Amino acid sequence: MPIYLDVHSVSGGVTIDDVAKAHLADLQTQGRHDVTYLRYWVDEAQGKIFCLVEAPSADAAEAVHREAHGLVADEIYQVQEGS
């Protein structure tokens, strides 16, 4: 299954606690879209969130975010894992 990295930009910054709550909502929603959210990273000061996800398409990954909490990504890239 393809792997995607999405990027969220939140003006005014973001907290790791808020992102953790949103991630839990993603986990509760992902099965309906055949998606698996794997990891996320946060830059609180810059208001950046990065999510790594296995999904059949970028649209499926976005649908999970939209349904779970409404915070859709500003950018999404299909990526390949390297070492």
Image: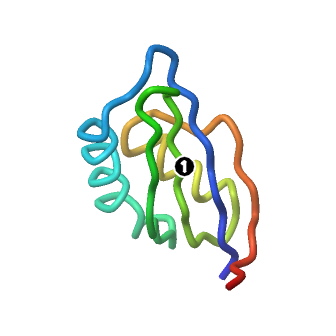
68 vs 72, left or right, is left
Label 1 sits on a secondary structure element that is: strand
**Residue 20 in the image, given as x and y percentages of width and height:** 28, 48
Way the structure is coloured: rainbow
Q: Is residue 51 left or right of residue 28?
A: right
Q: Label 1 belongs to which residue? A: 50
Furthest-top residue in view? 12
Instruction: Kindly identify the residue that appears in the image at 49 percent across and 40 percent down.
Output: 66
Q: Residues within 10 Å of mark 1 (few under 14, many from 20)?
A: some
The correct choice, above or below, for 69 with respect to 53 in the image is above
Rendering coords of residue 6 (x, y %)? 62, 50
Residue for point 54% across, 49% down: 50
Where residue 78 appears, as percent x and y from the top left, is 76, 64
Residue, x 51% and y 73% (percent of image)? 34
- Residue 56 position by quadrant: bottom right
Q: Is residue 75 above or below residue 23?
A: above
**Is 72 left or right of 44, judged from the image as shown?**
right
The quarter of the displayed image where residue 27 is located:
bottom left
Q: How many marks?
A: 1
Q: Nearer the viewer, residue 34 or 6?
A: 6
Residue 57: quarter of image: bottom right
Name the residue rendered at 50%, 42% in the picture: 49
Give, as a three-letter code, the residue at label 1.
Answer: Phe
Q: Position of residue 15 (x, y in %)?
A: 31, 32
Does 3 appear above or below 74? below
Q: Quadrant of the C terminus?
A: bottom right
- Which of the pair 76/34 is nearer the observer? 76
> In the picture, which quadrant includes the N terminus?
bottom right
